[in-house]
Structures are given as C-alpha cells and as structure tokens.
Image (spheres, grey):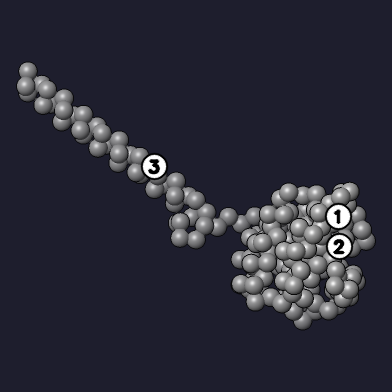
Amino acid sequence: MAILAAAVAVLTALSLFNLVLTLALVRRLRRAEEPGPGRGGALPVSPDLEQIPAGTVIPEFTATSTTGAEVSSRDRIGDKAVYAFFDTDCGICKQQLRPLVDFAERAGLAPEQVIAFVGHEAPGADADAYTSVLEGRTTVVMQSLGDELGRAFSPGGVPAVILADADGTVIRSGVEVGDVAAALAGA
C-alpha cells in the first residue's frame, strides 16, 4: 500500500509540474504575440485612413488659429507637418490630445508643424478642455468637419491624424497618434 501511495504522490507531483510548465509556456506565447517594443511581437500597422491614403497631397487651406495667427498649407511647405482632427463631442478624441502633444515634443516638432483642428459643433461643448492641453504645443484651429476646411481634408471622421512630408504629401494617416508616430522616423 505504501508503494501505491508513493506512486500516486509522484504522479501527482509530475502532473502539477507539467501543468505549471504548460501555463508558463502559454503565458510566454501570449506575451510574444502582444504588440509593442520589447515584447517580441511586431507593432501592428493600421491601414491609412481610406479617405486620406499615403501619397495624397494636403489640400490648400487658410484658417485662423485660436491665437489669431493665420495658418495655411503654403506655410507648411518645406517642413514636415502633422494635421490632427478632433471634435469636442468625441470621447476618443480627448484621449488622443496628450499623445499628440507628447509625440510632437519627442519628435522635436514646433507648434507650427502640428496643426490641431478642433470641432465644436455640440452645444455647450467644452472646447477649453482641448485648447488647454493643445495651445502652446500645437497650433489650434477651431473648425468642424462640416466647415470648408473639414470638407477639403475629408478625413471621414474623428479622430484623424495625418503626417505630411516637406512637400505637403501624406506619408501616413490614421485614427490614433501612434498610427503615424513610427512613420516620422522614416520621413
């Protein structure tokens, strides 16, 4: 009987050891599939915005920033530029404000090179929540997608982030700042 009890104990221990190894392997495989630097997986590449694919020329526009300065597409020729479209009625948009500012600072982009178009169509919309994060770090233009400027770009929705080269040609577009951040290194 003692031999049978010892055999059951050894088999139980081996089964538990096998279970622990299997769980560790599953965990490691899941981590390897996670996107992100240092995790083994490649960063997922989201497709460009259908309405503004790479190779599209930035439309000509002139607008007035919240500081009263004139902003135009002609002023951006010769510099890389980021065009970001937000709306105060969009919860996801608000989550992209800080990443945009952080990206601009990391990339060494001047506020004139990062134009944030903020739509404010909703009555009582809190534009201050947007401008307080963006002003001084980007050039803020209060416009909606329905305005002439929004129709010229035609991003199709918000948020929309567009990276253009010094010639005014779209390098990358997406719905998150992270969609265009990696493309700046190659621009």
Check disc 2 and give the amino acid type.
Met
Closer to the N terminus: mark 3 or mark 2?
A: 3
Q: Residues within 10 Å of mark 1 (few under 14, many from 20)?
A: some
Q: Above or below — where is 85 with respect to 137?
A: above
As drawn, the label of residue 142 is 2
For numbered disc 1, what is the local secondary structure? loop
Quadrant containing the C terminus is bottom right
The x and y percentages for residue 86 are 78, 57
Of mark 1 and mark 2, the one earlier in the sequence is: 1
Residue 55 in view of the camera: no
* Residue at (45% x, 60% y) in the render: 38
| Residue at point 34%, 43% (across, down) | 24
Which mark's residue is nearer the viewer, 3 or 2? 2
Residue at the spot of label 3: 26
Residue occupying the far right of the picture? 148
- Mark closer to the observer (1, 3): 1
Q: Indicate the quadrant where residue 39 lies.
A: bottom left
Q: Do the residues bearing badges 1 and 2 touch, measured as CB atoms within 8 Å?
A: yes
Report, in whole angstroms, how far the alpha carbon at label 1 lies from the one at label 3: 47 Å
Identify which residue is drawn at 68% across, 64% down.
Answer: 100
- 70 up-or-down from 178: above or below: below
Q: Classify mark 3: helix, strand or loop.
A: helix
Q: Quadrant of the N terminus?
A: top left
160 and 138: which is toward the camera = 138
Question: Which residue carries the number 1 mark?
Answer: 120
Label 2 secondary element: strand
Q: Quadrant of residue 19?
A: top left
User: Which residue is at the front of the view, 47 or 95?
Assistant: 95
Amino acid under disc 1: His
